[in-house]
Amino acid sequence: MLRIVLFLVLIALAGAGAAWVADQPGDLVLTAGSFRASTTLPKFVFLLSLFAAAVVIVWSILTSIWRTPGRLRRRRHEKRHARGRHAITHGLLAIGHGDTALARRHADTARRLAADDPLALLLHAQSAQLEGNRDEAQRAFRVMAEREDTRLLGLRGLFIEAQRADDAVGAVMIAEEAIKLSPSSTWASHAVLGFRCARGDWSGALTILDSNLSAGLIDKQAYRRQRGVLLTARALELETMDRDVARESVMEAIKLAPTLVPAAVLAAKFESEAHQVRRAMKLVEAAWLANPHPDLADAYAHVKLGDSARQRLQRVETLAAKIPADKAGHVEGQLAVARAAIDASEFARARAVLAPYVNDPTQRVALLMAEIERTEHGDGGRARAWTLRAVRARHDPAWTADGYVSDRWRPVSPVTGRLDAFQWQTPVASLPSDRGATIESSAFEEAMLAAPPPKRVTAAPGESPLEPAPAVSIPAAQDNSPAAALEQPAVAPAEPVSQAPAPAESAPVAATPVFRTRADLGKAAPAPVAAVVPIIRAPDDPGIDDEGPSDEFTEQIGTPKAQAGGWRGFWSRWGA
């Protein structure tokens, strides 16, 4: 509306000006030497307007002719750049669906048509990685690292190539340079934090963690938890070297992460040594309610030095009662009570506690039952039978991170370098894989546990008894559990039954054993099947696939080297 009003106002002003010029009387005379010209004012204004219009048109034509070569060059450059962008787009799509030849062809076209485009450099590096040409990929990433706009991307590419080559020192240097350029870089901070944890540089790891909080990479709650993990790791390392620093670190850690099991155990130990029994018990109870763990039960039992075994049993029963029977951690409390009852020679109490779990025992339950049989009655046969059941029983929870099972808690995962990755849970790889062998062996074990001692049958007068059967050795199946390390002695059958032989003229009668041996159950025992352990790839490494060349995303790099790669290689390089 405002533009319309302004347009009408301009038209009115132009009309008023034209009317004023037309109403002016007199002539306009132009004299130059002997030249003299006269005209009226309206004619002069009209001729002046025509001259100005002609000058503008001529100037426009001349300017257009002058600028034509530049326009042609610019148009040709734009067309070339468009072809280069087209090659980059289709090259990245070819990399996405794994077409190596097409990706290389588009990369060459993009490098020829749009060499200065950052995406052309990225396409060149990605196509080299897809072909398995690491030298060419490193050259492309170095070129990107020298440019201002692609420096961080080039450093990340060089970091991944150093990971693949198991160059831990080079990877650390690249990540530290990247974190100097961009403190908010997630991959660089994660890598530097993982490397410093692998080297045991807990002070440096704490510094990186503080930088991550300042850069906004983690929230306050995650920062408190991760700082508690790092302080606990430092305290565990300095426990035997510098107890003052260890105590200070673990006390700060337990404030930041009160449910962290190793922090609660170590803090309770320090408080117990300082005769702060009540405070130590509160620390253990807080962690126990969140995550029942055998180490917590043991620390609670020994929180007061000098107590007898029966007093420790009463204390553990109090701790176990804090978890209701319908909760998941109830079994840990019962196992802790059974352990304390065995130490206190309360075998009836231990049997009563373990009774709900003996039908489908885990390894710890079976080993506790074996210890009860060996300690209470000195029954070596039943103890060996329970030990054999422990080898084949279900696995108990363990410290697990990214498919890796550890015998102790660790602050970072050796697979991915992730901080606070270990959780107390049942390993996935420990699920039974040979159900038939388990059923067969369980029948034999149940016979050993349930069969009463056989009675000796005296041969008839004047007849010789049968020769006793030789001892049968039952080999234990291969297993990856800690209980498999226990010695498996040969299990001999009970004393054979002697029966009177049949008369010579009649057919011989085979002796019938009291219980069945493995030979009776099957002629050939099935071969044990090893547990399947999953292999986890580092999430920040988009590198070479370890599965076969049949995958369309597989990089063809020839025969792979027989060495660990990714975070496993870095972890082993640092001696962790």
Image (cartoon, helix red, strand yellow):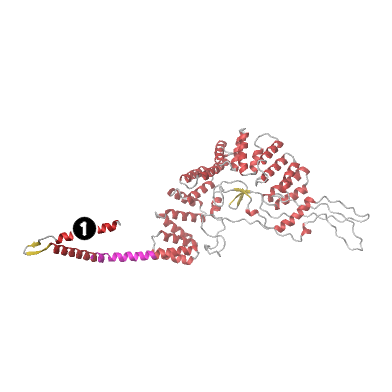
Q: Magenta stretch?
A: 62-82
Most common secondary structure along the magenta stretch: helix
**Amino acid type indicated by mark 1:** Leu
The answer to whether 68 appears left or right of 383 in the picture is: left
Position of residue 264 measured from the top left corner of the image (x, y, whole percent): 60, 40
Residue sitting nearer the eye, 93 or 575: 93
Residue picked out by circle 1:
13
Position of residue 34 measured from the top left corner of the image (x, y, whole percent): 6, 64
The answer to whether 371 appears left or right of 275 in the picture is: right
Q: Is residue 77 magenta?
A: yes
Position of residue 347 measured from the top left corner of the image (x, y, whole percent): 75, 42
Residue 201 shows in this picture:
no
Which residue is farthest right? 462
Residue sitting nearer the eye, 311 or 406: 311
Q: Is residue 575 magenta?
A: no
Using the rendered view, name the quadrant where residue 251 is placed: top right
Looking at the picture, does residue 53 appear above or below residue 150? below
Using the rendered view, name the quadrant where residue 271 is placed: top right
Looking at the picture, does residue 88 appear above or below residue 280? below
